[in-house]
Image: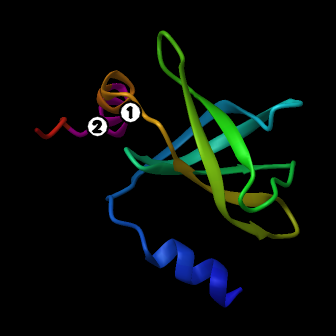
């Protein structure tokens, strides 16, 4: 648990709280998850499926059109009710970053 908390404490971007359904693919299956918070660098999701730490995923964010962002699972916490998963985005394009910031309710910075 300590390693999990240390990873979450290393955040460099302010996260925006959000509750919205979205999808997350592990490359084999696409799972319905709840997006709990997001920043231009990553997101926290919650769901019934457990994702392995360090695994590569694609998160399909609620937007029109939908945003597909690749990332890596940086931490996982499991409770009796759900799996909470931290995802660090990778290879985000400038357009995706702008759209994620709009979803966060923040403005893009130069």
Residue to which mark 1 is pinned? 100
Magenta range: 99-106
Front tag of 1 and 2: 1
The crowd level at tag 2 (other Cα within 10 Å; few <14, some 14-19, many 20+) is few
* Left-right relation of 90 to 49: left
SS class of the residue under badge 1? helix
Label 2 residue SS: loop
Q: Are marks 1 and 2 in contact (CB under 8 Å)?
A: no
**Residue at horizontal 63%, vertical 34%?**
59
Residue 40: x, y in percent?
A: 37, 44
For residue 37, which numbered disc appears in the image?
Answer: none
Q: Is residue 103 magenta?
A: yes
Q: Is residue 39 above or below residue 108?
A: below
Q: Position of residue 29 (x, y in %)?
A: 88, 30
Residue furthest to the front in view is 91
Mark 1 burial class by Cα count in 10 Å: few <14, some 14-19, many 20+:
many
Please give the name of the residue rendered at 87% of the width and 48% of the height, measured from the top-left corner.
49
Quarter of the image containing the C terminus? Answer: top left
- Where in the figure is residue 92, as x and y percent of width and height? 43, 34
- Please tell me which residue lies in front, 78 or 74: 74
In the figure, is residue 21 to the left or right of 67?
A: right
What residue is drawn where x is 81% and y is 53%?
51
Nearer to me, 5 or 105: 5
Q: Circle 2 is placed at which residue position?
A: 105
Q: How many marks?
A: 2
Query: Where is the N terminus found, in terms of image quarters?
Result: bottom right
């Amino acid at each position: 648990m300590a390693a999990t908390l240390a990873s979450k404490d290393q955040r460099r971007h302010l996260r925006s709280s959000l509750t919205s359904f979205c999808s997350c693919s592990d490359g084999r299956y696409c799972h319905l998850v709840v997006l709990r918070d997001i920043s231009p660098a990553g997101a926290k999701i919650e769901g019934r499926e457990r994702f392995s730490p360090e695994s590569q995923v694609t998160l399909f964010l609620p937007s029109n059109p939908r945003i597909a962002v690749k990332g890596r699972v940086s931490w996982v916490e499991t409770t009796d009710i759900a799996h909470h998963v931290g995802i660090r985005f990778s290879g985000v394009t400038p357009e995706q970053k702008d759209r994620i910031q709009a979803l966060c309710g923040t403005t893009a910075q130069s």
